[in-house]
Image (spheres, rainbow, N blue to C red):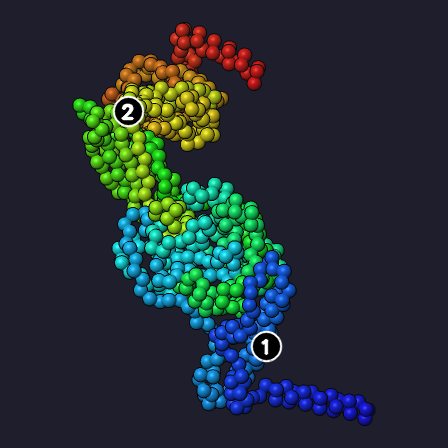
Amino acid sequence: MKKTVCFFVSLLFLLVTGLSCAYAADEFTVSQVEEMLQNIDTLQQMQDKRSKYTASGHYDINTTNTTTISKHNSARTGYEAYVADMFEKRAEAQKAYDALSDEEKAQLDSSLVAKLSDELPTSYLIKEYAVTPANNEYSYEAIDAESGYAYEVGNYMISGSIPQSFILVDTSDGATSWTPSGEYIYGESNYIVTYCCDKETGLEYGTHYKQVNLEDSGYFDEAEAQSIRAIIESSYPFVTMDEMKEKLKSSGMDGDLVDSLNRADLISAVQMAVWSYANVNDAAAEGLEYFASIDIPRNTGIYFTPLHDYTNEMWEWYPGKRTRTFDTRVQYRVNTLAEYLCNLEPVTPSHDQIVISELEVVKTELIDEDDGLYHITMYIALNGGGNEEDELKIHATSYSQNEDGTVSVTERSECRAECIDGIYTITTHAKDGDMIEITVDGKQKLSKGAYFYDPEGGREKSQSLVGMSEGVTSVSATKNTYFIAELANIPVQDIEIPEAEKELKLKSGETVQLAVTVKPENATNKEIIFSTSDTSVASVDEKGNIVAVGEGTAVITVISADKPSVKKEITITVAPENTKPATKHYIVFGKTEKIGWYSVSLDGGESFQIVFGNSNLEVAEGTELIIRANDVFGDPFTFYINGKAVKTDENGYVRVTVDGYMLIGALGIPDIEIPDAEESLNLFQRIIKAFRDFFAWIASWFK
């Protein structure tokens, strides 16, 4: 028992002592924290100290000089050790500072506390730049940024070329100056980020560009364009760095490798992947090999000063001014990512990602003609567009060539383009044999996608670029076509249907062919499209053959293929296939005393009178007779049907459903003998009845 107590006392002592020590370890005085802050470097100081770890001489993948290699590796190892140690000290200082109370934190110098900031200033130049306004499709300008034009620069090199991205500014608003809105944020910044796709031609800032489809670039074929689109739309800055890394991990790429990728890696890998498709022959010779790194932001002797350079956010050593250094770790990261991007599934553009660059006149519709001047409507399809936010105009100029080489204009027309089912229209006048030039221009709303930026003046003028964008862009497309009157479409104006076919009553299984006529008779396209509202009632084929299928009602619609707004409808009523003609029976209205006439209606239809004497009707079985007799002198009388008295309703009518031969009488003398229906028939009627009864008896044997 005593040992057990001692054990728990000892355990309690250890726990209390451990907790006290742990608590004490997290307690710092203001003086201790102040000393810790004094002994750490800011992020900018950490970057600046890269220059203290220097090495001379170039070191690339082909270097064999062991002294040069040793100097580079030693300098890099020294800087990396310093960075690792300093980040550890900064973390300890941050922890100590966080443990202070608010009163204690207030005692520290704010400049010391600022050293804990995890933000680095960039060399982004927020200033006003001169631009040249453009009112055509060449509305994007590469900014003249004084000594340089780069945007984000990867601090790795290939054959002396620095992977970088460039900025373009839309100058279609008429402004003569532009000021960047700040660090790049996709969808918010007032400029576009692009990659180069022709490494043989340098970028000339101040050059204007137009935005076109990758497939229309002329630099690479359709398959290569789709691969470049896949690269751009899967990478930074089309997606954020975090989004890109998540996608890489989900694809199966090693997580540690993905986490180690920095912004320079992404820029370099994307640029190399784009080059592998945009410069196919060069890529085949060079392979996917980045082999050097170089300092950009502090090196004024290098080619340019970037507007915005993120390399000062990297913690990688550089050897010194204009000196390259080889790093197998960088090579592996960039090449692995570039290979992944090069093997992505090609991406085709959606319709709202296609820049309007082509138009096609799909139909010319002849409206009328007056002394050789034809009034026509032209129907135009575009290879892109159709968004309700597009602001497009269509221009049509009809003209003819004179013998002396001059041109005579017949008419110029212009209208705001409105899209209906993907087709735009314009109405104009032309003479037979005129050339008609159709132009579509204006503003097009594009969805987020990858595009090609073509320099004004062609490939020799400036670097060609690929990039990502969305929103409004200026577009223009033109096409010339001959107008030949006899080839123009004469539209359908009407469809005529015979009166007898507007409503048809058919029996199930019955067929009929509609006799529709297209007007005018010289319409170019007389094709008619038939459809039915209910195939279970009636079907119809492309020639207008109707087949009654089942009982019910259906509507057959007849539409002009040339002009869908021209259509007619036909109502079809189908009776069951086994419907037979109803059996008819004789109804005899007997001659009686005093009764002057009978008023008779069949199934509630129009009434007719049977006046005096014996009269008879041949009526279908199931018909409802509504009968009223009238006594000439107003004496009372009684209705009799087949010898039995029946009562009238409150209005004096008798309702009878025919189910056989009947004798109907209305007698004022109650003791008269009433003959039956058969006795009231004459000889001819009796013979007919006998034949009908005989055949009915024969038919009963087959039921």
Q: Secondary structure at mark 1?
A: helix
Give above or below for 505 relative to 293: above
Check disc 2 and give the amino acid type: Ile
Residue displayed at 46% across by 56% down: 238
Q: Which residue is mark 2?
A: 484
Query: Badge 1 is on which residue?
Result: 85
Up the image or down, 526 lies above or below 170; here it is above
Residue shown at 46%/58% (left/top)? 164
Q: Quadrant of the C terminus?
A: top right
Foreground residue among 305 and 395: 305
- At label 2, counting other C-alpha atoms closer than 10 Å, the crowd grade (few under 14, some 14-19, many 20 or more) is some
In the rendered image, residue 561, in percent from the top left (x then y), is placed at 36, 28
Indicate the amino acid at tag 1: Asp
Residue at 61 percent across and 55 percent down: it is 252
Rendered view: 173 above or below 124: above
Does residue 259 appear in the picture of this structure? no
